[in-house]
C-alpha cells in the first residue's frame, strides 16, 4: 500500500494565533517553506520536522502521520 | 524594519520572477549571438562573453545566488524548499541536455555540427531549461 505523509501544522499554528511568517521566523526558515509543508507539497527533512516540533511545542507524532493512519 | 525572514521572502519572490527570464535570455542569446552566423566568424570577444554568462548562470543555479546579502538572509532564502526546487531544476536541465544531445546526434548525418557548436547548443538549452524549471517550481510554492 502506498503511504503519504500528512500533517496538522496549520491547525496547530492557527490554534496558537501565529501567522506563517511568525512560525517561519521562529524556525529560521522561509515563509514559503512553512506554506509548502502545510500544503503537503514538501515532505520536511528530519531537521525541519524537529524544528517544527520545537517551535510549536508538540511531539512529532502529533504533527505528522502516515496515511491511512490517524494520530 | 523588515525581519530577516521578510527580507528573504522578498528576495525569494524576486528570484522566482527573474530566474525564468534569465533562462530565456540564455536560450535566446544563443540564437542572437551565434545562430545563423558563420561559426568561423564568431569573435573571441563573443565567445568570452558567452562563456562568462554561462559560468555565472551555472554558479547561480548551483548556489541559489543572493551572493551579496547577509548570510542569515541567504540561508533562509536557500532553505530546504528552495533546495528542492533547485534539485528539480537540475533534473530538468539534465533531461534537456540529454534530449538536445540526442537531437544533435540524430541530426548530425543531415546537418553536421562541429563539437564546439554542438556543445554550445547543448549547454545553452540545459541551463536555460534549468532556470525556467526553477522559476516554475518556486512559483508553484508561492501563494
Image: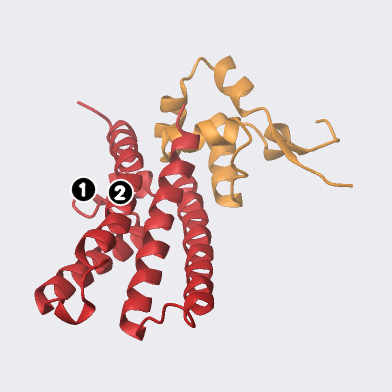
Display colour for chain A: orange
Left or right of B116, for residue B68: left
Residue nearer the viewer, B138 or B35: B35
Residue B89: x and y in percent read 47, 55
Looking at the picture, the colour scheme in use is: by chain
Residue nearer the viewer, B135 or B83: B135
Please identify the quarter of the rendering in which residue A21 is found.
top left
Q: Residue at x 32, y 57 (%)?
A: B27
* Callout 1 secondary element: loop
Residue placed under numbered mark 1 in the picture: B69
Letter of the chain shown red in the rendering = B
- Mark 1, chain letter? B
Give the CA separation, mark 1 to mark 2: 6 Å
Residue placed under numbered mark 2 in the picture: B74
Residue farthest to the front? Answer: B110
Q: Are marks 1 and 2 in contact (CB under 8 Å)?
A: yes
Residue nearer the viewer, A2 or B2: A2
Q: Are marks 1 and 2 on the same chain?
A: yes
- The quarter of the image holding the C terminus of chain A is top right
- Mark 2, chain letter? B
Left or right of B118, for residue A63: right
Q: Is residue B68 above or below residue B6?
A: below
Q: Is residue B32 above or below residue B5?
A: below
Residue A22: x and y in percent read 42, 26
Residue nearer the viewer, B30 or B87: B30
Left or right of A28, for residue B24: left
Amino acid at each position: 500500500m502506498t503511504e503519504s505523509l500528512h500533517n496538522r501544522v496549520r491547525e496547530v499554528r492557527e490554534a496558537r494565533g501565529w501567522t506563517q511568517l511568525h512560525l517561519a521566523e521562529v524556525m529560521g526558515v522561509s515563509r514559503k517553506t512553512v506554506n509548502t509543508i502545510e500544503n503537503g507539497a514538501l515532505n520536511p527533512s528530519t531537521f525541519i520536522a524537529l524544528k517544527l516540533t520545537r517551535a510549536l511545542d508538540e511531539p512529532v507524532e502529533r504533527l505528522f502521520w502516515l496515511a491511512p493512519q490517524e494520530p | 524594519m523588515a525581519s530577516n525572514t521578510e527580507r528573504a521572502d522578498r528576495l525569494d519572490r524576486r528570484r522566482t520572477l527573474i530566474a525564468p527570464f534569465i533562462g530565456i535570455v540564455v536560450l535566446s542569446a544563443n540564437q542572437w549571438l551565434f545562430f545563423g552566423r558563420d561559426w568561423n566568424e564568431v569573435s573571441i570577444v563573443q565567445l568570452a562573453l558567452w562563456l562568462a554568462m554561462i559560468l555565472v548562470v551555472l554558479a547561480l543555479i548551483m548556489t541559489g545566488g543572493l551572493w551579496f546579502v547577509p548570510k542569515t538572509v541567504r540561508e533562509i532564502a536557500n532553505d530546504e524548499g528552495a533546495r528542492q526546487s533547485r534539485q528539480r531544476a537540475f533534473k530538468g536541465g539534465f533531461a534537456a541536455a540529454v534530449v538536445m544531445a540526442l537531437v544533435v546526434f540524430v541530426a548530425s548525418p543531415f546537418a553536421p555540427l562541429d563539437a564546439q557548436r554542438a556543445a554550445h547548443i547543448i549547454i545553452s538549452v540545459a541551463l536555460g531549461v534549468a532556470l525556467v524549471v526553477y522559476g516554475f517550481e518556486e512559483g508553484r510554492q508561492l501563494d
